[in-house]
Each structure stands twice: as C-alpha cells, then as structure tokens.
Image (spheres, rainbow, N blue to C red):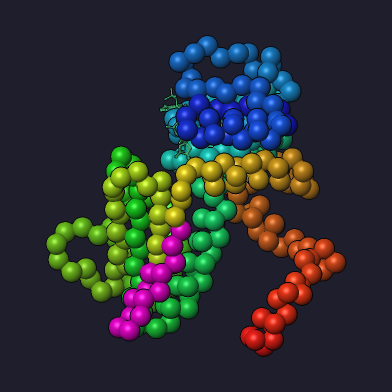
Amino acid sequence: MQALILGSGAMGLRLRDELTAGGHVVRAMLGRPGRQPRPEPATLAPIDMAFEFSHASSTIGNVRFALATGCRTVVVGTTGLADPGNGPRALDTLARDVGARIVLAPTFSIGAVLFGRLAEEAARLFGRFDAYDPYLLEWHRRRKPDRPSGTAAALASRVLPHLPSKRRARLADGTGAPDPDTLEIVALRAGASPGMHLLGFDADGESIELRITARDRSAYVAGALLAAERLLAGPAAPPGLIHFETLIDDLLTEPTRPAAEAPQPDPSKEDLHALVA
Ligand SMILES: NC(=O)c1ccc[n+]([C@@H]2O[C@H](COP(=O)([O-])OP(=O)(O)OC[C@H]3O[C@@H](n4cnc5c(N)ncnc54)[C@H](OP(=O)(O)O)[C@@H]3O)[C@@H](O)[C@H]2O)c1
C-alpha cells in the first residue's frame, strides 16, 4: 500500500518502520502542522491509506489533509478526541461528505479489545456473588499526565452495570476506607511501564485477577495495520466512521480454518492423551 503517516512521534515512527519492513511505501510522514512546510496534498497522490496518530488539536486538520490527497481510507488512533469538534461525530461527517471510511479506536490493541470483553463477562459472573469484591488497578509510566487511564475508565464503565454491589467507580484517594458500594480504581505512576490494567475480585478465601500488560507500542501498531488491511481488503463498509471494535466483531464471526487445514494430532502425544483421558 501507499501510506501517509500524520504524526511523527513514537507511533508514527513505529508505523513507518513496520510498513516499510512489510514492503509498503510510506509516501510521507508529517509532524506537527506549522513546524515544517507541508507538500501540496495532490502531489502525494495516490495514497491508499492514511494513519493519524498525533495530538487531538491536530487530528481534524490532518484528516482533512489526508482526504485532500484523494485518500479515502484513514486509520485514526489519536486519543482525547471529543464531540462537538473533533470526536466521532465530526470524523463521521468528514468521511461521509467525501465518501471515505475512517476507522477510529482509543486503543488498537487487539488484546485490550478482547480484554474488555473478558472483563465484562467476569463482572457478569462474579457480580452475582457479594463475597467477591471487585477492584481495578492500573500502572503507567511516572510521566503519564492523566489518571486514571482512558482504558481503566472505559473498563470501569463497562463492568459497573454488572456489579449490583457497586454504585460508582472512583479513583482511590484520601486516607479513609472507601464506601463499600464504590469500585476502587488505583492508578499507580512509577517508572516506565507502557501500561498495565488489572481487574480483580477478592473474597475471603481466594482472589481472581485478569491482567493485561503492554510491553511496548507494537500491539497498537499491529492493530492499526490490521484495521488498514481490513479496510482495504474487506467487503466495503458504507462511508463514514467505523469503530475498531466492529472490525474485531466481524473477524470473530468469520468461520475459522476448515478442519482439513487444522494441524493433525501428533502421534507422539498419544500416550499423553491416554493419560489425561
Ligand atoms: N489508539 C491507539 O492504539 C494508540 C496507541 C498509542 C498512542 N495513541 C495516541 O496517538 C497519539 C500519538 O501518540 P504518540 O505516542 O506517537 O505520541 P508522541 O510521541 O507524543 O507524538 C505526537 C506527535 O503528534 C505531533 N503533534 C501534532 N500536533 C501536536 C500538538 N498540538 N501538540 C503536541 N504534539 C502534536 C507531535 O509533533 P512534534 O514531533 O512536533 O512534537 C508528534 O509528531 C496520542 O494521542 C496517543 O494517545 C493511540
């Protein structure tokens, strides 16, 4: 694919490396608007796919720039977008106006998307038993400017409706014990952690924990590339905004590999099969 990258920070650089390594052509990677003169959009055509990972204040301008090249498929990962202005509705309108498709996600980590579903199911199960007290813990690098993380906030609002014993979720602060009907969110800031989220349920005799730990940005890059591939190869969705979760839903409902292609049982493991039968 012929790609355009908007945002030349950590994500932009990683995307450029992955695209190049995969044999794609990065026509341009553009940093903060106004820092350097930008080329005329038409001179970059043809662009198959634009990736927008910059800053919320630049996203709409960047997407307009991408569309002005004639590109009609865009992956947007910048966080902090909100309507009215630069949120999902604004992006949807931009896309529909020119017949483009834009995939948006606060996280392109496939693991994080699936983790959200596991968390919701866990809350549905454990929420039936008052003995299991739920809690949320997240850990990010010391310099992260906000807390709780967007992912922790999203997890809290996802699990809360399934926890009859909890009326609200709140960032742990102060020195006293929290109200029993509060879901505690603990935001730890230390070191260089790119992100850890943990949903736990604690009872007298046992503790159950679901945890997702990011090691670096590669999971986000992989998800952004998957979104791009699906946009370019998949059955054409109507113009407008597409949420990454929807693409994952489509993927999950696709048939799995036919049995003929599945790996055959290893005969050397037959004894083991007998042992556990
Ligand atoms: N959806 C996901 O899966 C996912 C994953 C990771 C990150 N993100 C989000 O993607 C965005 C970029 O992440 P990153 O890790 O690449 O960030 P970063 O390293 O800080 O890079 C940000 C880039 O945006 C540019 N920029 C444009 N307008 C800006 C402005 N008004 N203020 C500050 N910077 C501006 C920066 O320009 P300069 O180089 O001139 O500073 C830089 O090129 C962030 O919103 C981040 O939260 C999303």
Residue 205 magenta-highlighted: yes
Q: Which of 127 and 94 is in front in this view?
A: 127
> Relative to 60, does residue 117 appear above or below in the rendering?
below
Q: Pick the quarter of the image with the C terminus.
A: bottom right
Residue 217 magenta-highlighted: no
The structure residue drawn at horizontal position 63% and vertical position 13%, both measured from the top left corner, is 40
> Relative to 25, does residue 160 appear above or below in the rendering?
below
The structure residue drawn at horizontal position 14% and vertical position 62%, both measured from the top left corner, is 175
> Relative to 261, does residue 61 appear above or below in the rendering?
above
Residue 171 in percent (x, y) is at 28, 57
Main SS category, magenta section: strand
Q: Which of 212 and 232 is in front in this view?
A: 212
User: Range of the magenta residues?
Assistant: 200-212
In the orientation shown, which residue stands out farthest toward the right? 260
Residue 216 is left or right of residue 275, and the answer is: left
Residue 221 in percent (x, y) is at 57, 41
Q: Pick the quarter of the image with the N terminus.
A: top right
The structure residue drawn at horizontal position 73% and vertical position 74%, both measured from the top left corner, is 268
Res 98 visible: no
Residue 190 in percent (x, y) is at 28, 47
Total numbered badges shown on the rendered structure: 0
In the orientation shown, which residue stands out farthest toward the left? 175
Res 214 visible: yes
Residue 81 is left or right of residue 207, and the answer is: right
Residue 64 is left or right of residue 164, and the answer is: right
| Residue 50 position by quadrant | top right
Residue 158 in percent (x, y) is at 46, 63
The structure residue drawn at horizontal position 45% and vertical position 15%, both measured from the top left corner, is 35
